[in-house]
Image: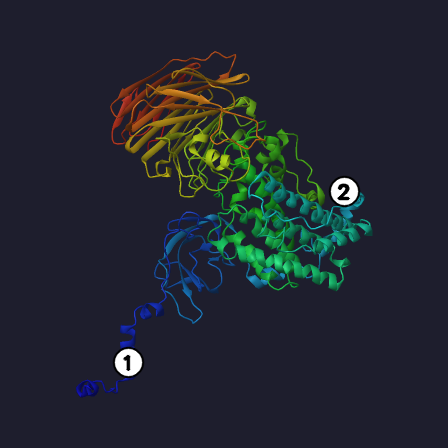
Amino acid sequence: MTNKKFRRENVPLKVPAAVNVLVLLLLTPGLVAAEKLTLDERAAGAGEWGYRPGEGSVSAVNPPSFSWRPQKGLRWEIECARDVTFKKVEYRAEDLKFNVNCPPRVFKPGTYTWRYRGKDAKGRYTNWSKPKTFTIAPDATKMPLPVREELLSRIPKNHPRLFVRPENLGQLRELARGKMKGDYERLVRECEKLLARPPSTKEPPKYPKDMVRGSEEWRKVWWGNRTYTIRALNGAATLAFTRLLGGQEKYGLEAKRILLECAKWDPKGSTGYRYNDEAGMPYAYYFSRAYTFVNDLLGEKEKKICRDVMKVRGDEMYRHLCPRHLWRPYSSHSNRAWHFLGEVGIAFIGEVEGADDWVWFAMNVFYNVYPVWCDDDGGWHEGISYGHSYLGRFTWWADVMREAMGIDAYDKPFFSQAGYYTMYLMPPGKVGGGFGDSAWRRSASRNVSLMSQFAAQAGNGHWQWYVEQMGGARETSGYIGFVRGTLPKVKAKPPDDLASSRLFGGTGQVYLNSDLSNASKSVQVLFKSSPFGTQSHGNEANNSFMLWAYGKRLLVRSGHYDSYGSAHHSNWVWSTRSVNNITVNNRGQGKRTAQSQGKIVGFKTTPSMDIVAGEAGQAYEGDILDRFTRAIIFVKPDLVVVYDRLEAKEPSTFEYWLHAINKIDVENQRDICVRNDDVVCDIDFLAPSGLTFKQTNEYDPKPRPRIKLREWHLTATTAEKKKQMEFVTLYRPHRAEDKVPSKASLERIKGGYALKVKVSDGEFAAVLPTDDRVTLEAYGLKSKGAIKCRLKRVGEPAKILGLEE
């Protein structure tokens, strides 16, 4: 039955349009929100570059580089003002593609406030960000990034463009005939070898379908394709460059043949960047170098073949890196790839669509997001082997930028300090590179090549002294060596004016030395508690330490880099068990993660004593600790005191790990000895009592069969479960023939411990807190909740050192 009343009440009414819109908005969930753009201002997380300049920060470069969280679908506007109300805007940039910006002009030193906002394709703006105030130091390095059009216009229109400009060829040819004739003749000999035994240009194979990634067979293909590619295309670049200097035409023709044969390789095949970046990256930059060096011998059809290939390869790299790398730059391989892409872009700009974007992206990385594994203090989180490898490759880009665009990479504050990292970590003659993958077998002599570049570019006499202590600079081979042949000579300066120990705060590492001049004369303690955590190749647990004495390794980081991510690498090397550290109920710190962070909370150095303290309680998996503070006192050169304070959430057992290359002699916890040839270290666990010891030379899991070398691992386990635990351990490194004192006492006092130790020609005393609120008093020392110590040697006044505020 029809309900007439219902029908009558539902007759459409004439309602004003504005009311209809209001009703629609009210009744449509999310529509209002969809129309409103909200800025994502979440704090930066682990692995993210962060907001820069940060609140309260001081910029060491002028202008500062601005960085903020990216947001899909937005372009950007930033403002920088002298006041927090932004009534007087000193700098504004609009319609920015990237979430980073380095202004093209220098600012006046002083205090500034900046903010940013986004704009979508429809022209709608987000809210302004929360303002951040920072200061530009009066002595900040001046490094403005030129505007895009002006910067790219500096790149030569003609070839060559990489390492050398067309207008500079005449000067290089003159040098080849004159004072650099010997360098030129070495290039000629290399070319003759390449002609006599030309590199193969057949496309290398892909991985078989049934091959296990990471296996030994896989590694042979993975790395083998890299070396195969380098031999072919670097050979072509060498031939082509030598011809440019005045070499025979046959060199250029052979370079052209190799280049065009390699151009036939599938750009997304076995040497594709995403398929195997270890082959794809060298293909990209060596191909580009060969192309620009041999360009005048290529016909238009041949140039098009090369351009088409590099369009595919360049786009693949660009899509992978941009814009992701500008906010999440903590990827090991990507920190090479961006400047390799820059080389490709310079070689093909104006010839390949998008090449200008590749160059502009690379320059934004350099100015805004490089280097990442460090701070301005010059350290390198991934360790010296990876640091020198990556920085060595970066110096190619530095040469390219200087020639193509007139940009001096060495103006960056980092490069004014970078050489000190090597000097303090590896004094002349040292074997073993400390923390980081592949570092343990490195010798100081391997540092000479990069250090000589740093010394020449920075004009640093200390670094030149380091180079000369190991026989002087090594000749850089090939065309790069020739280009660098005119670098200025630097006068060596011994490190007599430097402290022997140094903190690299950006990476959370401290290198304590008794003597910088030669490892054979020195005792060295390395310590890590890092804000970078355990990510990438710097995977050692926080609060780890290592010990060298008189050129010999005593307490080491153990394990082998048999293959990245192998069972042994990921489950032993990445674990807290592999380093001189402490596990709790057999649990360690987070493995290979930026979230497992430590922090240097105190550091003081003097000629006679050093103290460093690190905090790593929050680094452990499962949130099992409230505290793990490790302090190291170095009484130079004969005593190292390691004081550990741990506070667990539940009663726990604590395992103290030590590692050595030879079996450790254990009589009891007060009488332990590590020996390496004619150097020994006596170890005394003063506290806690009742430790039980276990020793093995096996790993769990074992490295791959090709690794035959084994090390010894000692574990000292506490007798009972407790929530709070302290370890007080003495280490006395010395030459085997030297007689050293062994007397030491540890006494419980109110708020901590009183320690007294006999040392050569004197006595050392310290108060060690267990309660930060209590004032400790003993042996004439007084301190509230902080370590304080005194050294008195015969014939010298007493020396006091502490970590009090």
Q: Nearer the viewer, mark 2 or mark 1?
A: 1
- Earlier in the chain: of badge 2 and badge 1, it is 1
Give the amino acid type for the residue marked by disc 1 in the picture.
Answer: Asn
- Is residue 606 visible in this depiction of the protein? yes
- In the image, taking residue 803 as reference, residue 735 lies left or right, namely right
Residue 413, horizontal then vertical, whole percent: 51, 45
Name the secondary structure under disc 2: helix
Q: Quadrant of the C terminus?
A: top left
Across and down, in percent, residue 258 comes to: 74, 52
Please name whichever residue, 725 or 274, is drawn nearer the observer in this view of the structure.
274
User: Which residue is drawn at the image coordinates 66% and 42% (left, top)?
Assistant: 488
Residue 728: name its quadrant: top left
Q: Give the crowd class for mark 2: few <14, some 14-19, many >=20 residues within 10 Å.
A: some
Relative to 328, does residue 1 appear above or below in the rendering?
below
- Residue at the spot 61% in from the left edge and 55% down from the top edge: 268
Residue at the spot x=68%, y=53% of the render? Answer: 287
Q: Which residue is mark 2?
A: 190
Disc 1 target residue: 20
Q: Amino acid at mark 2?
A: Glu
Does the residue at mark 2 contact the one at mark 1 (Cβ under 8 Å)?
no
Residue 651, image x, y percentages: 28, 30
Describe the element under mark 1 as helix, strand or loop: helix
Pick the quarter of the image with the N terminus: bottom left
- 253 on left or right of 495: right
| Residue occupying image coordinates x 54% and y 52% | 366
